[in-house]
Image (spheres, helix red, strand yellow):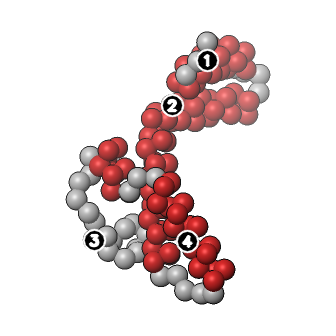
Amino acid sequence: MNPSLDDRLASMARAMGEVILPALIGAEGLAEEQTSLLLGHRNQLRSQIDLVSRYEAVQLAGYIELARALCDGAEGDSLTMASFARLREFAERAAPSRLAVEERFFGISGRRSKPSWGGPPG
């Protein structure tokens, strides 16, 4: 069995809170403080873990949008243009549009006047 990330984080919290922290109480202030800090960070990670893939998908779509804009304005010799052609090919097959990702994950509909990175209107 391969436990989920949530199960692993819960197991870490139990170990820290039920075994390690009680053993450190009174032993050394810094160790106790750092253990409590670690538990706080773990709790924050657990609360955000479901957002990570959504955030990464939106970021990837933004990079694809940027690559397309760079290719649209590309100028140069044949080697440079061949490089931009490869970039465009990658951008076209790499990910759905930023708008599709935002609509799927965040329920955002409609198109902003400009992408968040300040590129040309969409």
Q: Which residue is at a point 68% across and 33% down the rendered structure image?
A: 34
The x, y position of residue 26, in whole percent, is 72, 21
The residue carrying mark 3 is 113
Q: Earlier in the sequence, mark 3 or mark 4?
A: 4
Residue placed most toward the observer, 74 or 5: 74
- Which callout, 4 or 1, points to the residue nearer the camera? 4
Disc 2 crowd rating (10 Å Cα; few below 14, some 14-19, many 20+) is some
| Numbered label attached to residue 85 | 4
Instruction: Specify whether 101 is left or right of 52.
Output: left
Residue lying at the far right in this picture: please name it.
27
CA gap, disc 2 to disc 4? 41 Å
Vertical position of residue 55 compared to residue 63: above or below = above
The residue carrying mark 2 is 46
The x, y position of residue 81, in whole percent, is 59, 79
Q: Earlier in the sequence, mark 2 or mark 4?
A: 2
Q: Which kind of residue does numbered mark 4 sit on?
A: Ala
Disc 4 crowd rating (10 Å Cα; few below 14, some 14-19, many 20+) is some
The residue carrying mark 1 is 2
